[in-house]
Amino acid sequence: MPLTVQHGPSFRTIQEWLHEDLERVEARMREIPLAFEPLKTAVDHLLTAGGKRIRPLLVLLTGRLYRPTDEAMVSLAAAVEMLHTATLVHDDLIDGSLLRRGVPTLNAIWTPAATVLTGDYLFAYAASLAARTENVRVMAIFARTLMTICEGELHQQFGDREAMMSRQDYLRRIYAKTAAMFELATEAAAVLAQAPEPEVEALRQYGVDLGMAFQIMDDVLDFTGEVRALGKPIGNDLRQGLVTLPTLFYLEEHPDDPLILQILGGGSRDDGMIEEAVRRIRNSGAIARSVAEAEAFVRRSRAHLQGLPDGPAWHALWSLGDHVLRRDR
Amino acid sequence: MPLTVQHGPSFRTIQEWLHEDLERVEARMREIPLAFEPLKTAVDHLLTAGGKRIRPLLVLLTGRLYRPTDEAMVSLAAAVEMLHTATLVHDDLIDGSLLRRGVPTLNAIWTPAATVLTGDYLFAYAASLAARTENVRVMAIFARTLMTICEGELHQQFGDREAMMSRQDYLRRIYAKTAAMFELATEAAAVLAQAPEPEVEALRQYGVDLGMAFQIMDDVLDFTGEVRALGKPIGNDLRQGLVTLPTLFYLEEHPDDPLILQILGGGSRDDGMIEEAVRRIRNSGAIARSVAEAEAFVRRSRAHLQGLPDGPAWHALWSLGDHVLRRDR
C-alpha cells in the first residue's frame, strides 16, 4: 500500500517491461481472419496506425497484479483494443473525420458502406476475442460497454444542445466516450484474474477515473496541442460544435462572448473564427482549470489502488496517471 | 424418425403452438434499455415492423426437440432476432433502401450517423442477450456468424463483378447473407439444449440448407412478388446490379441479352429497363429452375432431421420447408 511513492516508472519503462506481453497482444489482434483482400489492407492500415495501446496495457497491468499473463488475458487485451478500434472506425464516419493519428481515416479513402461494414467486422472480431477468454461475465461486461458507448454517441449527436452546456452533461458524455472503455479494461481483467470482489470494484473505479482524466486531457489538447502531436487539426471539437470542459470553463468567465456563442449555436464558422476562438480559450484560465480537474480524477483513481497487491504492476498502474496528465502524450 | 410424413403443421399452427414462447421472446427483445427517447422510438418502430420471426422459431423448435423452453433459450431466440435486426439496419444504410417490409427504413427517416449508431447499439444488445445464455460456445458462434455476414457483405459490395457471375459465388453470398444466421439459430440452440454432438452438427446443417432455400425464394420473389407482399419495390436486386439465381439461370439461356448485360455492367438503368428485364426473366424458365433449386435445399435440410428426437418440434422443423417454399410468405 505504498501511497507515499511519488514517482513510478515512466510510460516507456512500463512499455519495455511488458514488451513481450504487448507483442503477444499485437499478434493476437493480427490473427483476424481476412480472406477479402481490400479488408485485409484496411485492417493492416488501422492496426499499424495504432496508438499507444494504453487500453491493452491497463488489462495486462491489472492482470499482473494477480498472476503472470496467460492466453486468456492476452485475448482480453486484444479484444479491448479491437473494440476501441471498431468504435474509432464508426466515429470517423459519423464525424466525417479525414485524419486520425496523422493518417487518413478509412472514411477518407473508402465509401461509407465499406466503413460501416469494416467497423462491424471489427466489432465481431472483438467479440470473438472476448469469447476466447471463455468467461461469461467478461463477455457481458463487453456488451454492456458497447451499449454505453453507442448510447453516449447518440446522445452527443442528437441530444438537446442546450442541455449539453452543463458540466454534468459533459462528464456523462466523456464517461460514455472514453471512461467506459477504460472501465471495461480494468474490470474485465480483474474478473478474469479472479480478483476478490471488492478489488474488482476498486479496479473498475480506478479505470473510470483514469479514463475521465484521459479524456479531459484529450479535450485540453484540442486547444493546446500541436497538429503534429495530435495527428488531427486543432480546434476540432469547436469546429463540430462540441462543448468540452475548456469551453465550459471559458463560458463561465465570459458567458456572453459572441464568437463562442455563435460557433456553438450552429451558426456559420470559418477557420478564422475557430482559430480566434481557440486562441481566446487557450489564453484564458480555462485550460489550467481543466488540467486541475484532470489531476483531481488522477488523484481519485490512485485512491482506489489502496490496498491492492503491491509489486511492479501496482506501481505501473499508479504512474499511468502521470502519463495521462502529460501534455505531449 | 417419420420421414414418411408428408404434411406437417402449417406455419400458422406452429406460431399458435409456440405463441407463449414467442411472446416471451418479444418481451425479452423489448427489455432493451433505452434512456434516449429518439432511440427508443426508432427501436420500437423496428420491432413493431418485425417480420415472421422465423429465426426465433428455429431456436425455439430446436430447443424443444430436447427440453421445454427455458429462460436461456428465450434469451438466445431474442439475441438471434436482435442480431438480424441490427444487420438489417446497417444493410438498409449500405443499400440506400428507403422501404423494408412496407415501412420506411431508419435510413429514410434518420441521418446515416444515427443509423450507424442505432445498428451498433442493437449489435451490442444482441451480444448482451447472448451473454444471458451464460454459454461461452454460444457466444463464440454468435461472433463467428457476425464476421461471416460482414465479410460476405463486403465481398458483395466490393468484390470482383466478373467473379459474381458464377453460381458458386452466388451460393457463397447467400450463405453469408442468410444461411449463416439460420445456422446460428439451430446450432446455438442445439448447443444450449445440450444435444449430443452429432445432433448439433445435423441441426447446424439443417439450418444452413433451410437458409439457402429461404434466400433463393427471396431472390425469386424479387422477380415474381407483389410490391405489397414484399414490402419493397420489385426488381430491387437488378436495380442494384446484384446478380441472383434467376438472373444467372436466365443468362445461361440468353448469354447475350444486351438489356440484362447493360444493367449488370453498371451502365444506365432506368425504371423502364428494370421492368422489362424483370418481365423477361419472370417469363423465362429461370424462375422454375430457381424454385427447383430451393426445393432441393429443402429436401437436403429434411435429410439432416433423420434420427433426431421425434415429437411436435420435429414435425414443425420438417414442415418449415413448406413455408419457405411458399411464394406468398
Image: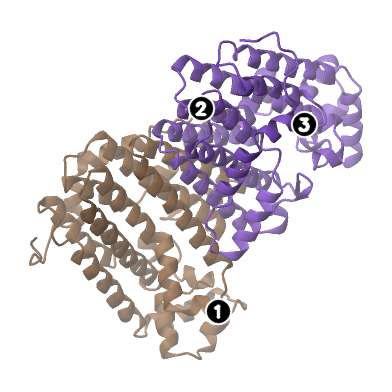
Chain colours: A purple, B brown
Label 1, label 2: how many angstroms apart (C-alpha)?
Answer: 54 Å
- x%, y% of residue A208? 60, 22
Q: Which residue sits at x=26%, y=61%?
A: B206
- On screen, residue A287 versus residue A59, left or right, reads right
Q: Which residue sits at x=56%, y=27%?
A: A64
Q: Quadrant of the C terminus of chain A?
A: top right
- On screen, residue A66 versus residue B317, left or right, reads right
Closest to the observer, B101 or A129:
A129
- x%, y% of residue B319? 18, 60
Residue marked by disc 3:
A265
Q: Is residue A16 visible?
A: yes
Which amino acid type is marked by label 2? Arg
The answer to whether the residue labelled 1 contacts the one labelled 3, judged by CB atoms less than 8 Å apart, is no
Q: Are labels 1 and 3 on one chain?
A: no
Q: Is residue A13 above or below residue B56?
A: above
- Numbered mark located on residue A67 in the image: 2
- x%, y% of residue A312? 63, 22
Q: Are labels 1 and 2 on one chain?
A: no
Q: Is residue A208 visible?
A: no
Q: Residues within 10 Å of mark 2 (few under 14, many from 20)?
A: few
Nearest to the eye among marks 1 and 3: give it.
Answer: 1
Residue marked by disc 1:
B162
Q: Quadrant of the N terminus of chain A?
A: top right
